[in-house]
Image (cartoon, helix red, strand yellow):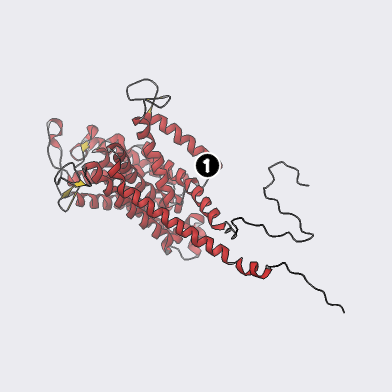
Amino acid sequence: MSEQTVSRPAGGSRAASSTPARPARTIRRGTVVKWVLIAALLVFLLVFPLYFDEFWLRTGFAVFGAAIGAIGLNLLVGTTGQLSLAHAFFLAVGAVSYTYISGESGGLGTRAALQGLGLPPIVGMVVGVLLAGLAGLVFSPIAARLRGIYLGVASLGLVFIGVHVINTWTPVTGGFNGRAAPEFSLFGFTFGNSDPQLWVLGVPFREAERLWYLGLVLALAAYVFARNLLRSRPGRALQTLRDSEVAASVMGVNVQAYKARVFLVSSMYAGLSGVLYALSIGSIAPESFTLVVSIQYLAMIVLGGLGSVGGAALGALFVTALPLLFQQYADVLPLVSAPGQGGISAGFAARFLYGAAIILIVLFEPAGLAGIAQRLTQRLRRGRAPARGGATTPPPEQPGSAPTPSVRPSQGSDTR
């Protein structure tokens, strides 16, 4: 019997041994790039108040507050799969509680009947968050028995109840005219324009600069907590609930208890967002917590990506900053007019734009803005490391093997 000689390409063993190491190096490189980008973003956010004016700082603080509320709603809708339209109600609970607990009684003219406890603002913030969570916990038994559109309709009633209470409970809320929100302070440090005077690198740090850092710290804390929650055992249980409640119960998940807990956490997020909203606007009013606000938060999580914490923050940036930018630059944007003039107002123009963006996202990118970022990251990790000469050489084709197409055939093409 004659021996068959199998020829092996030169350097074949070397290439085979080095092939498994390439994906690992690529993954490590992608991780390093990720952390470098995160560090650069944090540095940018920290030095932002030193180089930008008050408009951008006010806009950023509003985005931070909206991002906290969007992350909480995404835990409920995107992660657990429970549709809720009551987010505006829980925002109102946090904002009204903070204004009443930390506000002073009395006033001038029609505001003389206002009541307030005059407690420190940090107490008002904490109690507002806890009361919003308690409201969500009270509503959770109803949420545990309903699903889908039925839960959405049931939660819709809370919004109308909240608007009615704000309009009629005048001593606490200020009624139709609303009520001013007290300045925030922490351990004697006031987040206002004075007391104390503060300068950093020659830049005066007034209310806008101080609130920027307050919103940044709270938004980062909310983001980190949500990410850790989703990576934990309760987070995996919530995701199982979204896929199938029957399968979750078979696996030992207490469906009723987890639904109540996620409503509690989501409502607390909304309460904190309501407090920051009151600080951002400087007052509370019934029109600030209508059904439109709940729909805006749903738009944030759909645009950002259901189930993604970072996507919720991106959606909040898009939906919250867009009307403010349109209003600021209404004189140079086509078809957009300033308040009181003809044409499309900044608020309506922004709604048209992110409404169209929602349609495009649903049609072409269901995972939202977070899905785009995730796909780019996966491409970076799956990419092949270049050879030493700088070019990447494809592997040689084996005799008799069919060539692999580089592009997927378009729909309707003849591939026979």
Note whether residue 260 is visible. no
Q: Secondary structure at mark 1?
A: helix
Percent position of residue 310, x then y = 42, 51
Q: Is residue 291 above or below residue 38?
A: above
Q: Is residue 75 left or right of residue 378?
A: left
Q: Is residue 175 above or below residue 387?
A: above
Q: Outermost residue, front direction?
A: 389
Q: Write the residue at 41% across / 30% down.
A: 349
Q: Is residue 179 left or right of residue 9?
A: left
Q: Nearer the viewer, residue 401 or 181?
A: 401
> Dot 1, crowdedness within 10 Å: few (<14), some or many (≥20)?
some
Q: Nearer the viewer, residue 124 or 164?
A: 124
Q: Write the residue at 37% across / 20% down.
A: 342
Count of numbered circles in the view: 1
Q: Write the residue at 48% across / 54% down.
A: 242
Percent position of residue 356, x then y = 49, 34
Q: Outermost residue, bottom direction?
A: 1
Q: Quadrant of residue 235?
A: bottom left
Q: Which residue is mark 1?
A: 362
Q: Is residue 269 left or right of residue 243?
A: left
Image quarter of the N terminus:
bottom right
Percent position of residue 100, x then y = 19, 44
Note whether residue 112 is visible. yes
Q: Quadrant of residue 85?
A: top left
Q: Nearer the viewer, residue 340 or 389?
A: 389
The amino acid on which the numbered mark 1 sits, given as a three-letter code, is: Val
Q: Write the residue at 43% across / 41% down.
A: 299
Percent position of residue 288, x then y = 30, 36
Q: Outermost residue, right direction?
A: 1
